[in-house]
Amino acid sequence: MLKARGFTLLLISLALALGAAWIARGWVISRLTPPSSQPQVPVVVAAAEIPFGVRVDPRFLQVIELPANTPIAPHYSNPKQAVGLVALQKVLPGEILLRGEFARHPAGSMLAALLKPGMRAITVPVNEVVGVAGFLLPGNHVDVVEARMNGQRAVTKTVLQNLLVLAVDQTDSHKKNGPVVVHAVTLEVTPPQADVLVKAMTEGRIQLTLRGPTDTVLSTPPPAPRPRRIVIVRRPIRVTARRPAVRSVTIIRGTEVDKAHASS
């Protein structure tokens, strides 16, 4: 009798243990597995770093799944949508490919695809001094300083600020990090800025100054000096009567000498 009761209690304990293990397993799986009611959407991300100005090919891309309610800017959901586009800025591995960071490259120069709407590309001649000792690379930002002679004095002025470097010589990629002496730098400018730059190169010489990657503040030019006020003091002219000139005549009579005065 006692053996039968003990065996029954053992079976009941084993059943309770199995039930508790099953419940715990279900709870863990429910925590680790996203609810099936939340839909997933495909998102294209960078599988490797995409440099600035590089045409995107399939080796740069991969697809991941994200919850549909994840707030994401306009992006690509299919790799075929991004293949053949040109990167307008550097994209790091794992970053989502946003539509505003890429442009389609039509027929013509690759450089044209890098231009923003309304912008122009202009090339300026440089040397190892004007070109910041060869440290200018595509993607940098520069200021343009004009130097000209005003008589015997040299006058300098910053005429343009925060211009994007599109290319150095005929290279529009910034894979190199070391200094490279170049002879031409292509800048992105607006049409009015192009006029200012050509005028500065024609009337004097230009110098490029490199800006830091986070320096976007534009400095204001110093106020023009006020013209000096010239005060003219008119003093009255005093007119004095002119004294008549006195002339003397010497008269000699024998041994006598007289002087006679006559006024004119």
Image: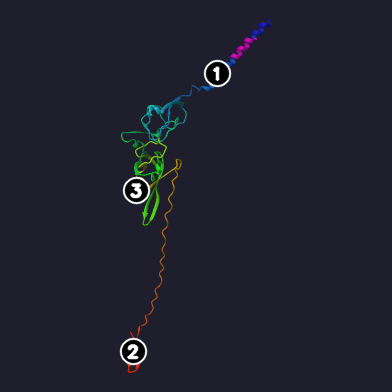
Q: For mark 2, what is the residue?
A: 250
Instruction: Pick out the residue farthest to the right.
Output: 2
SS under mark 3: helix
**In the foreground, 219 or 29:** 219
Looking at the rendered image, the quarter that the C terminus falls into is bottom left
Sooner in the amino-acid sequence: mark 2 or mark 3: 3
| 3D distance between C-alphas at marks 3 and 1 | 76 Å
Q: Residue furthest bottom?
A: 254
* Type of amino acid at the residue the image marks with label 3: Met
Q: Which of marks 2 and 1 is in front?
A: 2
Residue 251 visible? The answer is: yes
Q: How crowded is mark 2: few (under 14 residues within 10 Å), some or many (20 or more)?
A: few
Can you tell which quarter of the image residue 263 is in? bottom left
* Residue extending farthest top: 1
Residue 220 left/right relative to 200: right
Instruction: Name the residue rendered at 37%, 48% in the picture.
Output: 206
User: In what element is the residue under mark 2?
Assistant: strand
Measure how far apart labels 2 and 3 are at the Cα level: 83 Å
Q: Up-down: is 224 above or below 217?
A: below
Q: Which mark is residue 26?
A: 1
Question: Which numbered disc covers residue 3?
Answer: none
Which amino acid is tagged 2?
Thr
Name the disc covering residue 201, or none: 3
Q: Where is residue 15 shown, x and y percent of the image?
A: 60, 12
Q: Position of residue 141 (x, y in %)?
A: 41, 42
Element assignment for label 1: helix
Q: Quadrant of the N terminus?
A: top right
Percent x, y of residue 69: 47, 28
Is residue 74 part of the magenta span, yes or no?
A: no
Range of residues picked out in magenta: 9-18
Q: What residue type is labelled 1?
A: Gly
Residue 229 in percent (x, y) is at 42, 62
